Image (cartoon, rainbow, N blue to C red):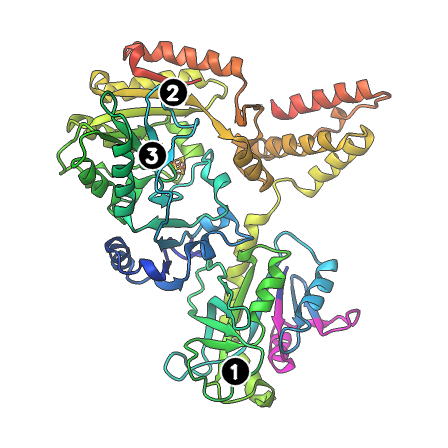
Amino acid sequence: MKYFQPNFSHIYVERGALDYPLSQIALKKFSKSKVIEVDHYKDIFNRTGQDFQVQKKSMKLILAKKTEPFLYPASEMVQEFGTPNVYYNTPILNCLYNCDYCFLQGMYSSGNMVVFVNESDFMDAIKIKMASLNLTLDPMVVSISYNTDIMAMENIIPMASRWIDFVKTQKKLLIEIRTKSALFSLIKKMIPHENVLLSWTLSPEKIAEEFESTAPPFNSRLKSAKEAVEAGWAVRLCFDPIILFDGWFEIYSQFLHEVFREINPSKVRDVTLGVFRMNKDFYKRIKKREPTSTLFYDNYEIKDGVVSIGKKERTESLEKLEELLSEYLPKSKILIWK
Amino acid sequence: MQCILSALKAESDPLINFFKLKKDDSYSFPFYKKNDLCLIGIGVGKNKIEKRIFTFLNDYNSRSLQFINIGIAGGKINNSEKGEIYLINKIKDENSNENYFPDLIVNSNLLEHSTITVDKAIVDGGGDYNCLVDMEASEIYKVCLKRVLVHQISFLKIVSDYMDEDVTSISKKKINSLINEKLPEIDTFLKKYKNLQEFKSSILGNVDLVWISRARSELNLTETQYHQLLSFSRGYRLKNPNKKFEDNMILKVYSKTERNKNFKNICEILSA
Ligand code: SF4
């Protein structure tokens, strides 16, 4: 890696974003980085002719101020599981990690990361939305780690903890922080809050090594999730995407056994299951760039704009896993993207 | 292939000598080459850049091509040093006010600066200019970007003056010496930059492509089938780095039905 600049060797800052506290935290953290002023984050993030994967070799940080919209209705790809009032927001664009199956490489032309530093605008938008919704039965759910892994950035820009503090001031708001990080230690001192759902994506070691090589290894993630469960946080375990290959069921059986040997299943809020799937346009865009992950050369089916494993194989595999999981948890706690 | 773009003969000469490039007279403009490195003389200012680069690209178009603009630029006494070489991280076109941002992936250890591309040389000390001043960078960026990706274009500028000399009046000897002084840095940069090329190497090797092309013509594949075959072949190559594409997979076929059957069979073998 010596041929490449370290990640965040350069920080591009929108003129209007410089004075925000989050910008100052980032600039202090990377005091040796070269700071380059930009008029608008899109001047750098949306440039034509970028190569996502090359840029991932040396990611740059872009500090910017987001304008509306600050909140989006959840896409079909997010597991809503019948819950109403589900939204997501984008405090960060792109991820510190680079999983082979990640849709971000098809969504963004850039491998660099944008951090929107006007966090209070995001929070105000949620308050406004909450005021317009009927939240007597169900809370408003916001996924704040949808286009990123916000927790993975916590030791760089502590946004997750600031969001947790915000949730504590709102009665009818639940946030989901989905992560593959091993950084629970950074929020360990906070008092757990029932309206903060920490979701860890866990995969068997073989899968993590092959397709999630830039994320922390399985054991570190498991350790973090276990600590969170034991500290009393609401924890969701995401077994998603399930990757099917020769011998997958044995590997996943052993993996689930390992997971629930460490984590008491009765203390887990729920688990999610889903196979590899991706918006067809993102998939096509990635495929055009000749990706080097074998994942993109398997046989898939396109249905309703989503690329995934054929329905029959998908359902059969997920049902098998559901059965296996039901040895540990009641079926009502197993949420499946079918 | 790496392609150096330089404006003045006085900038090119030290580079040609150092890298032992040979003139190729088949071009109507200065063009020098040795193995994987070449140099195009693009002239001063923006005018001839597009034509010369595109003429070159007609003959040398490869996925891993890199363009490196090397030349002198004006600096300011308070923010740059005469004789110093800078890697450019931002280019502003004075005319259009557009900003361009080269990718900075390679760990070059060079100092960095931004540059503003002007149409007329600045000789009055530079007034409000806070960056370097040059006459080609924005046009080079725009032109090259039509054919290659951002990370395949880099800019190295050596400060020749403090915006008090017209580029055409700076002595050849002075320019030669400015470039000569920085040849080791330029050489190191080019070597490091070359490492980025491996990310554009194709999954399929030449032998694989020959097999695919044989399958395409002998089976008379449709365009869609051909693209499917390419995709399956890439997957096969990734999963089986050392396996051959067997010749006997391609059968002699006499009808579309037979063709389709053989094609399906090939796809099954490749995706197994
Ligand atoms: S952790 Fe999630 S968001 Fe990050 S690269 Fe992996 S799949 Fe994408």
Report how far apart the C-alphas of labels 1 and 3 lie in the structure. Answer: 50 Å
Question: What residue sits right under mark 3 in the picture?
Answer: A217
Does the magenta run of residues contain B97?
A: no
Q: Do discs 1 and 2 share a chain? A: no
The image shows residue B161, relative to residue A275, as above or below, that is below
Q: Is residue B163 above or below residue A1?
A: below
Q: Amino acid at mark 2?
A: Leu
Q: Quadrant of residue A290?
A: top right
Mark 1 touching mark 2, by CB under 8 A?
Answer: no
Total tally of numbered discs in the picture: 3
Q: Quadrant of the C terminus of chain A?
A: top left
Query: Which structural element holds mark 2?
Result: strand
The amino acid type of the residue labelled 1 equals Leu
Name the foreground residue: B75 vs A250. B75
Q: Is residue A286 left or right of residue A120?
A: right
Query: Which residue range is magenta in the image?
Result: B4-31
Q: CA distance from mark 3 to mark 2?
A: 20 Å
Q: Chain of mark 1?
A: B
Tell me: residue A230, above or below residue B209: above
Label 1: element kind = helix
Marks 1/3 in contact by CB < 8 Å: the verdict is no
Nearest to the eye among marks 1 and 2: give it: 2
Can you identify the residue that label 2 sits on?
A273
Q: Nearer the viewer, residue A39 or A280?
A: A39
* Residue B39 seen from this side: yes
Q: Which residue is mark 1?
A: B178
Observer-side mark, 3 or 2, equals 2
Residue positioned 28% across, 61% down in the render: A31
Q: Chain of mark 2?
A: A
